[in-house]
Amino acid sequence: MSSVLPRLRFNLDFLPSPDPTRPGLFIRDPYHYSDATLLVPPILVQALQCFDGTQSTLDLRSELVRLTGEIQVGPLEKHLFESLSDAGFLENDTYRELKAHREAEFASEPKREAIFAGSAYPAEAKNVTALLSRHIRQPMGTASTVGIAAPHVSPDGGWNTYRAAYESLPNISEAQNLTFIVLGTSHYGAPERFGVTRKHFITPLGEAQTDVDLVDELNVAAGDAVRMEDYCHAVEHSIEFQILFLQHVYGPSVKILPILCGPFVKSIYEGGLPEENDGLARFLDALGNIYARDGRRLFWVLGVDMTHIGRRYGDSFRAIAKSGEMLSIEERDRERIRYIEAGDALNYWGLVQEKQDDLKWCGASPLYTLLRTVPGLKGELVDYDQWQIDPHSVVTFGAMRFTRS
């Protein structure tokens, strides 16, 4: 008897195999609800289209017969379905149970453990220290500096820009009593929402201290705009990387207020300013009130990248860093940056809204949040770069320092 197949999850990563001896399509879960990784052979990739929530087991069987030229495809059909389901890649009860379990597990954990130690950077403290010491010198910023913007690309893709950003921090003596508001891009978060957590952040260098009083204040003041103990913190790198760098500069017990900024989708696609959303406006007001009251002890650190372009990001063309189309992309990046430097949130956001942000700036919302929260802000671009993340795609990013006029 034929039955409707569950839909393949939309929020998965699909990547071509990098190993020519094992061709196919890799599928993995960026949310880490499942730790499984599947390699779908080339001949079966097209069969994945049957998992769209409308087609049946009979449709899948017919497609497998067409693709393989074999009549007896029952075992193959069963293996494909069970592999996807057991991995949690289908929108069915298996996935919902994995999701509920992992989110409840994160909510109950006392601390936010490092997830990228051992992959994006070393897992051992001495190796992390040795690596960062080679690339990051002592901060040379002044007391007038109130914030920086750094990348969140893999450190190996952006050392020069990380260095430029973190050398703009205040010197150690001036930063002893600072709490660092870390605004990170929420790559997996809900639109028009801010993700917060009361958990302290663990890295190989030690335990960064989250200011739970400020977290609670935001939670009370901003209501539905806040996602408390947002699971995205469990899998997000944009804040973890910044905390690691801050610990290297100022010590393991650095004080932080970690905030993940979801995309401002409604404003980008429907027009109007982001704060026309009532919840978002309440959050910006609450964060602005905290800065107005406690600004002398607060410092802003943004973990933001800029343009994402090329086939990896859904474009039809191959992007090559610092050549061809990427030269005009740099000009567009710099046009936005000039408004950020001027503290001009409205004109900056107007450029983001053009063509519904076809540049795909994943740092758009944290930067807007900073500009709308700190009045009289002025910025300075201190480094800009483009990284060839794969043979067909490029990410751009910059380092900025901010002062308050």
Image (cartoon, rainbow, N blue to C red):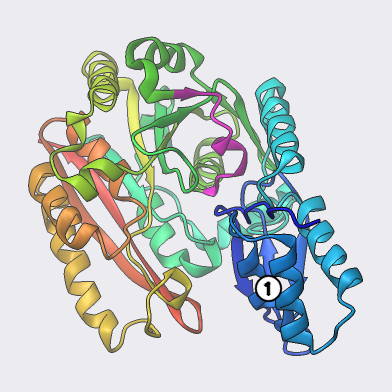
Q: Nearer the viewer, residue 105 or 65?
A: 65
Q: Would you say 231 lies left or right of 164 here?
A: right
Specify whether residue 305 is painted magenta: no
In the image, which residues are magenta? 227-237
Q: Position of residue 337 (x, y in %)?
A: 18, 58
Q: Is residue 167 visible?
A: no
Q: Position of residue 34 (x, y in %)?
A: 74, 48
How many numbered marks are there?
A: 1
74 w.r.t. 126: above or below: below
The amino acid at mark 1 is: Ala
Q: Nearer the viewer, residue 113 or 261?
A: 261
Q: Is residue 366 visible?
A: yes
Q: Quadrant of residue 60?
A: bottom right
Q: Residue at x 43, y 37 (%)?
A: 190
Count neighbours of disc 1 (C-alpha within 10 A) and say few if under 14, some if 14 to 19, many if 20 or more. many
Q: Would you say 379 lies left or right of 290 here?
A: left
Q: Position of residue 230 (x, y in %)?
A: 54, 29
Q: Residue at x 39, y 9 (%)?
A: 220
